[in-house]
Amino acid sequence: MGYKKILVPINGTKVDEEVIGLACRLAKISKAEIYAAYVIELERSLPLDAEVASEVEKGEKALDMAEKIARSYNYGVETDLLQARDVGPALLDEALERKVDLIIIGLSYKTRFGEFSLGSTVPYLLKNAPCRVMIYREPRPSS
């Protein structure tokens, strides 16, 4: 499987480090380009171009970390800070615009109402992405 363009959505959690590392290892095989994207999800009450300084800072920190990890693999990553109403559609637009052939998304182990939950972004990408989607879920916490 030779991938040429890989999109890695990140969100500032510890699973990001593992996902960027995985993307670098896969990208080296076929000399693929890696794009890391952080999406700031804006409340509907705010205009799309509103700058929420705390969220911008968090996003830039996560993207800097992605670049640092990629450098540790002797690989480069292009980063992008996006703002949108919903993360899923923003990532889909990014994937379409960049013509990626793989999305690798990290997933923290989360529960909702006592049950494991994929959230809303992963199912959206699985349903709508025109390319392969790889989910990398962190281990279930031990009880």
Image (cartoon, grey):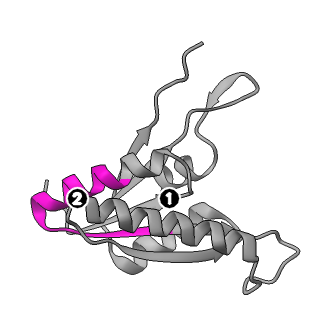
Where is 53 relative to 21, above or below? below
User: What's the distance in space between the residues labelled 2 and 1, CA to CA?
Assistant: 18 Å
SS of the residue under disc 1: strand
Instruction: Give the position of the C terminus as an image quadrant.
Output: top right
**Residue 130 shows up from this direction:** no
SS of the residue under disc 2: loop
Magenta region? 20-37
Say few, some or many: other residues with alpha carbon within 10 Å of mark 1 (under 14 / 14 to 19 / 20 or more): many
Q: Position of residue 12 (x, y in %)?
A: 56, 56
- The reply to whether the C-beta atoms of the residues labelled 2 and 1 are less than 8 Å apart is no
Q: Earlier in the sequence, mark 2 or mark 1?
A: 1
The single residue placed furthest to the bottom in the displayed view is 49
- Look at 56% across and 33% down and name the residue there: 109
**Badge 2 is on which residue?**
73
Say few, some or many: other residues with alpha carbon within 10 Å of mark 2 (under 14 / 14 to 19 / 20 or more): few
Q: Is residue 24 magenta?
A: yes
The single residue placed furthest to the top in the displayed view is 143
Q: Quadrant of residue 112?
A: top right
Three-letter residue code for mark 1: Ile
Relative side of 97 to 1, left or right: right
